[in-house]
Image (tube, rainbow, N blue to C red):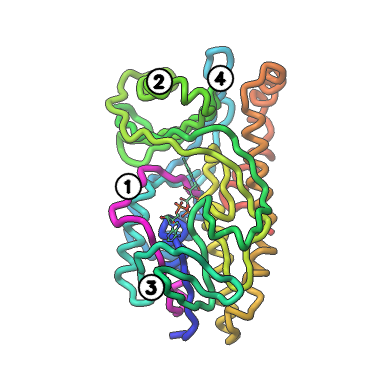
Amino acid sequence: MNKQKICIIGDGLAGLTTAIILSKENIKIDLYSNSSKIFLDNRTTAISESNYQYIKDNLNFNNPNIFWPCKKINLYFEDKEKIVNFFNFEEKNKKSMYIFQNKDLRKKIQKKISATNKIKIIRKNIDSIDNEEGFISYEKKKVFYDLIILCIGGRSKLYTSIEKGRSIEKNYEELALTAIVKHNIKLENASQFFLKEGPLAILPFKKKVFSVVWSVGTEFFNLNKKNIEKIVSAKLRILLKTKSIKNIANIKSFPINLNLKTKYFKRNVLILGEGLHTVHPMAGQGFNLVLRDIKKLKGLISKSLKLGLLIKDSFILKDFYNSRKPENNLLGLGINLTNIFFKDSRYFSSLKKVILINMNKFTFIKKIGQSISDKGILF
Ligand SMILES: Cc1cc2nc3c(=O)[nH]c(=O)nc-3n(C[C@H](O)[C@H](O)[C@H](O)COP(=O)(O)OP(=O)(O)OC[C@H]3O[C@@H](n4cnc5c(N)ncnc54)[C@H](O)[C@@H]3O)c2cc1C
């Protein structure tokens, strides 16, 4: 076992996945978590075929039954009260995406972590980090590490000394409404509806159950807060042309913003996960980017350890920054442009309709879109 020690702060999807994947490098990891044991994250996440394979292979899932495979993704737009299907993603011998409930993947990884002696879970809130000396502090205690990875979500005061307020930011003034829907229809594939109120995604993750992610303006939400369940239910009945919606539960809302860090690390402290890039959920790319970041980081750490180098003094974090920043920023900004394109605007609606209706004809656009959402932009 290598004597160097890594610290990961945060046990969301990013922290847990990073811990279990880096533990393969025969290195000790301390994973700090401030969340309670029974954490109910009812959100679902869609990942690409490549990322699904990466998780399946690296986490040694023998029976990955928590993942729902979708062959097709159907895209629709709203045109004067009519719902028009303008584009479908489907590839031969390949799934378009895999959907899972966040809490199921977290549980699976937590179980793997308890079975290894390379990761120690420490249930503490980290108050501060010192990136000059390379230590973290809690309850007046200082602990030194060779590498400190911050997987502490979109916003945290712990980022301040690294980013120094420099990042690409935008407040969309939108909220993502999420809910779990039980139904009685045959629904196996995912759909995205670009509606006047904002994009609405239907993501099946079990037989007769799907999750909805509907991004709406804060103003719309505040006006309709009291009746939101009825509104979501009525909308789904129209979109799916069915009365077989049995139950809508767990309606939650998440503020939406764009945050792309321009600085990723300072000395031996690295930001990872939502803290590095928070993107609009309409494209379902956030965790996909995180997985590609983890893959790159693992490769760099592995190479450095094989060469017998000290993580602390190596170029790992600089190389990570140089190779991941272009894709993270390009995709984040691309998703932002897509969001602007689909916004309800009376000036561009005719032009938008022409572009969308003809999109299926441009097979090369389809191929590029499929490749980027599967493997990212390869640099
Ligand atoms: C509505 C919605 C839908 C989404 N859908 C998709 C999708 O379909 N596909 C996709 O790829 N991505 C999607 N995403 C993005 C995806 O959910 C995130 O990228 C992913 O969950 C990773 O989050 P994270 O672990 O970085 O952060 P978080 O989930 O925020 O976890 C951070 C953790 O750090 C802990 N923590 C914070 N501060 C401290 C501290 N000081 N000390 C100790 N612990 C601390 C917190 O308790 C928490 O457990 C979606 C996001 C949203 C909001």
Which element is circle 1 on?
A: loop
What is the x, y in percent for residue 85?
A: 54, 24
Alpha carbon distance from label 3 to label 4: 49 Å
Alpha carbon distance from label 2 to label 3: 45 Å
What is the x, y in percent for residue 335?
A: 62, 40
For the magenta stretch, what is the residue range? Answer: 22-47
Quarter of the image holding residue 258?
top right
Residue contact between numbered discs 2 and 3, judged by CB atoms under 8 Å: no
Which element is circle 3 on?
A: strand
Where the C terminus falls, by quadrant? bottom right
* Residue 231, numbered circle: 2
Does ligand 1 reach within 8 Å of label 1's beta carbon? no
Residue 367 visible in the shown view: no
The amino acid pointed to by label 1 is: Leu
> Which residue is label 1 attached to?
40
Alpha carbon distance from label 4 to label 1: 34 Å
Nearer the observer, 214 or 125: 125
* Residue 78, numbered circle: 4
* Residue 119, numbered circle: 3
